[in-house]
Image (cartoon, rainbow, N blue to C red):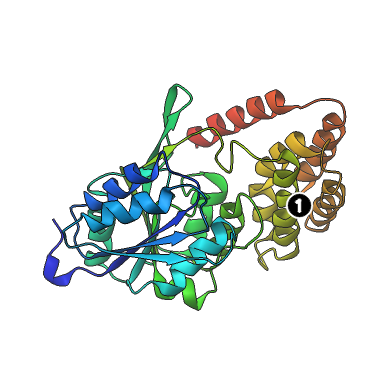
Amino acid sequence: MVDVNQSPGVSIIIPVFQVSDYVERCLWSVINQLYENIESILVDDCSADDSIAKCERLIEGYNGPIKFRILHHEQNRGLSAARNTGTDAASGVYLYYLDSDDEITPDCIEKLVSYVCDDDSIQMVQGRYQMKGDGKEALGKSDEKRLLSNDEVREQFLRCRKLNYTVWNKLVKRSFIIDNGLYNKEGIINEDLLWTFYLIKHLNNAQLCNDVTYYYHIRPGSILTGGSKRKKGQSYVVIFNEILNYLTPGKEREELKGYQSTFCSELANYLRVVPELKPIIRLYKRQAKQYGCWSVYFTIITVAFLSRFCNPMGILKRLNDLREIVLRGK
């Protein structure tokens, strides 16, 4: 149990757009938090349905310790912009991003805060998530593990995959985000990947929590499951162009290897509908050649060739499964 007299303030930031069927479930999960020193900032990204009306009714009838605020965009600007608006408006020592079609466990904030109450030098605490939807459930990978250096952070993200490339379900010091300019890039989809790329450049003191604190709901029509395939592919053009042009000095080889699987998967998915990926393929090959990552170089050549005729996702999955087996054996 966290000592309420020493508990730091937490700002839960919730972007809201076209989530009428889900937003009340999300807000109830905030209202039911055992931890009390919370402000919840809802950012209305010009939702055309009754999502905000439902939020207002629920908040109006709430009488408890959590302070709710609703901020309004004058025009629809996207998930990244809504998160950024919430970040700038937050007053909490720590920030926690929650998507409005998902929910958190009642002890989510209490569990994550318990680590920083014991040691306020921790910059980020990540909980475990449970994926729900499409008739199946899955648990995200995690460990109960303290990371005391940037090398350990990179190990967990780039090799072990225990540090997730999501913005949500991470309790992060607001000063750490502001000081390092860790804002979400606007105008793209799956911005979490790029945000995490910059996060691991600076993160050197983190805690992984093995308890489930977040329920990620797969739903039809969401940003990731719906929308234009071309727009998604174009977003990966932006993301990987930035990653490859801003590789961390001295860490280029491990980053090229670490992002290879994700890049190849998206290459297989989108190359035939997004020809703008071709220059990114050339850039990845050039960087791999420059830093002597020959396995990366030849893998990208192979996937790019196969993607012209088919989607080699099955092959990639088998290769990734083999990689996981090798890693577990170490």
Looking at the picture, how far across and down is residue 311, in whole percent?
77, 27
Q: Amino acid at mark 1?
A: Val
Classify residue 223 by image quadrant: top right
Give whichever of 168, 228 is nearer the camera.
228
Relative to 89, residue 286 above or below:
above
Seen from the viewer's position, the closer of residues 26 and 21 is 21
Q: Depth check: give the residue in front, 90 or 286.
A: 90
Using the image, determine if residue 122 lies above or below residue 255. Answer: below
The residue depicted at 44 percent of the width and 61 percent of the height is 43
* Count of number-bearing discs: 1
Percent coordinates x, y for residue 303 in the rendering: 80, 34
Residue at 61% over, 37% down: 226
Residue at left offset 69%, top offset 59%: 243
**Residue 131's x, y, as percent?**
43, 34
Does the image show residue 222?
Answer: yes
- Label 1: element kind: helix
Lateral position of residue 62 relative to residue 86, left or right? left
Q: Position of residue 71 (x, y in %)?
A: 43, 66
Residue 311 position (above or below residue 284): above
**Can residue 213 be seen by looking at this rendering?**
no
Quadrant for the N terminus in the image = bottom left
Task: Please state if 221 lies on the left or on the right of 266 as rendered.
Answer: left
Judging by the rendered image, the residue that carries numbered circle 1 is 237
In the displayed orientation, state which residue is furthest to the bottom. 179
Crowding at dot 1, Cα within 10 Å, few <14 / some 14-19 / many 20+, comes out as: many
